[in-house]
Amino acid sequence: MSVFSIARFPRIPLSLSIDGASSILRIGKRALHICPDYVERARIPRMFEAYAGEEKGSWELLILRRWLVSASLEA
């Protein structure tokens, strides 16, 4: 796993981790996980689909039926 620190602001830490096909972008307490969609679906999904996550303040976004973006709050 590679970790790159893009920038460091006085109050907002920003970092990017790249591991194969997936990436994690951390901005403050928010983490965005970007990876290929791993769910087999019995239907053809829309071009963009958004869902509320299981945890408070989290969500998932399926982009172009292929890429899954998951956002969560880190403690």
Image (spheres, rainbow, N blue to C red):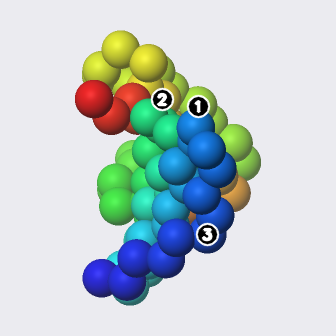
Residue placed most toward the observer, 41 or 49: 49
Question: Closer to the camera, 35 or 10?
Answer: 10
Residue under pointer 3 = 6
The dot on residue 50 is 1
Tag in front: 1 or 3: 3
- Vertical position of residue 1 compared to residue 35: above or below: below
Residue at x-position 33% and y-position 34%? 74
Q: Which residue is mark 2?
A: 59
- Horizontal and vertical percent for residue 33? 44, 54
Q: Amino acid at mark 3?
A: Ile
Does residue 51 appear to the left or right of 40 in the view shown? right
The N terminus appears in which quarter of the rendering?
Answer: bottom left
In the image, residue 44 sits, relative to residue 64, either above or below, namely: above
Mark 3 residue element: strand
Q: Nearer the viewer, mark 1 or mark 2?
A: 2
Amino acid tagged 1: Ala
